[in-house]
Amino acid sequence: MSTIALHDEHNHDHADHGHHKETLISKYIFSMDHKMIAKQFLITGIIMAVIAMGLSILFRIQLAWPDKNFPFLETFLGKWAEGGRIKADFYLALVTIHGTIMVFFVLTAGLSGTFSNLLIPLQIGARDMASPFLNMLSYWFFFMACVIMMSSFFIQTGPASGGWTVYPPLSVVAKAMPGSGLGMTLWLISMVLFVASSLMGGINYVSTILNMRTKGMDLWKMPLPIWAFFLTAILGILSFPVLVAGVVLMIFDRSFGTSFYLSDIVMGTDILPNEGGSPILWQHLFWFLGHPEVYIVIMPALGISSEVISVNSRKPIFGYHAMVYSLIGITVLSFIVWGHHMFVTGMNPLLGGVFMITTLIIAVPSAVKTFNYLATLWRGNIRFTPAMLFAIGLVSFFISGGLTGIFLGNASLDINLHDTYFVVAHFHLVMGSAAIFGMLAGVYHWFPKMFGKMMNAKLGYLHFWLTFIAAYLVFFPLHFLGLDGVPRRYYAFTEFEFMKKWLTVNVFVTWAAIMAALAQVAFLFNFFYSIFKGKVSPQNPWEANTLEWTAPVEHLHGNWPGEIPTVYRWPYDYSKPGHDADFIPQTVPFSQTMSSNLPHDFEGNAEAEKIQQEWELANPVAENKG
Amino acid sequence: MSLRKFITNKTTAALAVLLTVFANTSVFAQDAAAGAAAAPKVDMGEVYKSVIFYVLIFLAVCLFIAIIGKSIRVYELSREAQGKPVGINWNRVHASLFALFLVLGLYGVYWEYTVHGAMLLPDAASEHGKKIDEMFNLTLIITTIVFVVTHILLFGFSYIYKYSAKRKAYYYPHNNTIEKIWTIVPALVLTVLVLMGFLTWRSIFFKVEDPNNKPLQIEVTSEQFKWSIRYPGADGVVGAKNYKLTTATNPLGIDFKDLNSRDDEMADEMVIPVGKPVKLILTSKDVIHSFYMPHFRVQLNTVPGMRTFFEFTPTKTTAEMQQETNDPNFKYLFFCAKICGAGHYNMQKVVRVVSEADYKAWIAEQKTYLNDDLRKQFNLPVAPAPVKAVADSAATDSAAAKTNQMALNK
């Protein structure tokens, strides 16, 4: 708290920012300003996303044309694509690293890291995070994790390739596949650093939200993104340590000869000495994080889209309390559903039944959220900004992918769908595409806040429509491969007669994926070009209510010159009847909006109600207007 | 604005024109060459392999988009100059695009359901599989209805309630009744699905064994990247294994000290009698694999260090399925569904479902795992060699097995 008080004083003293000399290094590299750290997270996240997308195009090429040579692949990949054909081992490495980067580095750090850092202080009215130094460390641990993960492409045996879930014994026994050598060690080190980063971030987010809200900002006046980041951070704090525990045990198994996950293993005729462990233990530990992880990925996206949809429909979000309670419901339930990833792994079938019940319950809060989005759009006055387009896209993906979850959450149906392309299609829609769309919506919406410039809207439109259509073209057909019993992580479909009919579909899907990838060029160009050459942003470009739009466009350390604004109302007073503008910022007191106040606004404050009644008696016209 | 600058830049423009011309001429040149040289000599394949070719196409597309962007800008500026209100009403454009997307999307979904939906697995060939299929169909109907309705609402609202300066949105922050309804209704529907799923799941994994119709035990062991099948032999029991006994001659580590093991038979394919329950005993030697037999709706991981069980009853013979699918080459298969290494994508075995009589004839011809080498290794007397060859009916076979076993017991 002392830091905050300090900032406060300094900002009083010098109206212009910079009470301590900022050097290039302290401003852009080892910055402790939450806005700069948010940008660092975002740009790193974007770079990782481009890399992971590139990897996916590589394996899509292999799937579409398994018997064609692509000499340029050899140029880039050398011995991993001898003769222009990706090797089976490297194919698995591509799939693994694509998944790891996307889930952890892009959709966890890139999404939560960016927007929690940017929006928490700005939307709750704080000068910075509770612990700016920890915040800086959080970014640099994340950065190191990225570097170490990528470095595994430059070692002899290649990156980890046992799938992003790295199930032992495949990932532990070095002889099982080349990727389980040094590549896997690097994966584990990278993951430990990543978890450290996300914990430092999470603790910071929670303590900032709980302790540093501005005057008047009680929990029920917080914008929904903040609720989402808050619950996401709690999820992360409670579940990530379990992954670290699992990872440490795995490091012991790999390097020090313990047998936590290994027992009764014979590689060829080579009998391993390990006894007494169980590979299932890893799956429990992994999915105890892994399932909350998918909500860590989607909840910030849902929070962002709640805000974006409300602002651009010019309507209050429908059922604010229900939205918060459903987020809380998802948070709690997400801890007791991990077993649905393990229905057919040999786990006791009795547990399968229990996990099926908890899993399908989680569909209820998700359904409530969806219906509330629809109700928010109903009778709105919708402005299709690029952010709004992506938010609507998110809702569509969330529905499509969520519904297929009802199949997979049902243990009986999962028997035949487990580890098929149906699963691939399901999670790419519901947590891949939906979360990425939430992230993009956030980028388009808060770009003016981050860089003080506007992005080009028309390129944004192009980007949205190409990506939206391409994503459906890629993932919708994949459901049917799964329903036909085609397993995922297959290097080629050439060895099975019944899979050959899907080869043409694979070609189609690959072209759609390439189209989606190229559409991102429109975004990347727009993003980097607008940072430097974009139109300067007005103070409140979207006419939104939340606090961040009251902070000056020009960034300053401490966010607001002078005092932090006080909050008087909830953030969703859009198109309130009786008010001349169609939005009322949170900083406007009710005394200035007498014509639009509703009895509900005073939360039982008798005196305020009396004043309002007196005013209404004195101004009968205004009431008729309302 | 950015586009405008980009286009007005003379160098960019010149470069872009050059590129388009170059890309076009090179394509035409290739075409012409292909035509002139009468095909065989020109390897058109090279063109498609050339990355530069695609990069050029992409740049041409970018240029095209930039030109469109520029012309839109010109149009808007000219409208502005003439004092007319707005150039393009983008809100209307997007609203219409959403409506169009809804119509095309629904058609696309219909097309997928009918075209790709017709390419799926045939109806389940096992008893429990039928229940799974019913469950699947029910879930499919419910989810499809929700999918279509919510999307009509989502894109419909986007179309109807597009921005208009004349209108103000309807201030409607909450309605507890509606919210209760759409919490309770999904909860009820899901309760039905959960109950049905739970009962189906129980009926699959918690079977009461019928003493008169004991399941046929078959053990399947996975390793990188193949399957080994072990039939129980005459005693109907698959014998014990111990991974520490694994050698080149005894790759499964079968413990032949266990009497049940001695008559265990090996097989290249899985042959099972129709209508008789089969109990699969699944194990793995090295890493986790997944035993996946989609036609029977059977999947269970094979885990090193533990045995997993799946019981099912096949209901259609391979021949019946060939007729039903109109495919004389139809084969039941089982293959690996859990990532297990480089050969994961090709780890399969054929399953043949046959009549009881055919099964008996087939099983009589299978060899035991126990051979002379292993007998020596386990200090067992080498059996009189050709007992088995004489046996051709099931009865004599079991008799032979008995003599065999007696010989072993000495």
Image: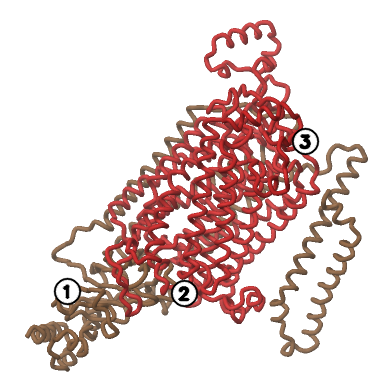
A517 to B173, vertically: above or below: below
What is the drawing colour of chain B?
brown
- Compared across the picture, whether B21 is left or right of B305 comes to right
Q: Going by the picture, which residue comes out furthest to the left? A: B410
Residue under pointer 3: A538
Q: CA distance from mark 3 to mark 2?
A: 55 Å
Mark found first going from the N terminus, 1 or 2: 1
Residue under pointer 1: B236
Q: Amino acid at mark 1?
A: Gly
Q: Secondary structure at mark 3?
A: loop
Q: Nearer the viewer, residue A576 or A6?
A: A6
Q: Secondary structure at mark 2?
A: loop
Q: CA distance from mark 1 to mark 2?
A: 36 Å
- Compared across the picture, whether B196 is left or right of A591 comes to left
Q: Secondary structure at mark 1?
A: loop
Closer mark to the observer between disc 3 and disc 1: 3
Residue A421 % position (x, y) = 48, 62
The subunit letter for the residue under badge 2 reads: B
What is the drawing colour of chain A?
red
Q: Nearer the viewer, residue A122 or B38?
A: A122
A60 to A616, vertically: above or below: below
Report whether residue B255 is seen. yes
To which quarter of the image does residue A9 belong? top right
Q: CA distance from mark 3 to mark 1?
A: 81 Å
B200 to B122, vertically: above or below: above
Residue under pointer 2: B342
Q: Amino acid at mark 3?
A: Pro
Residue B314 % position (x, y) = 29, 68
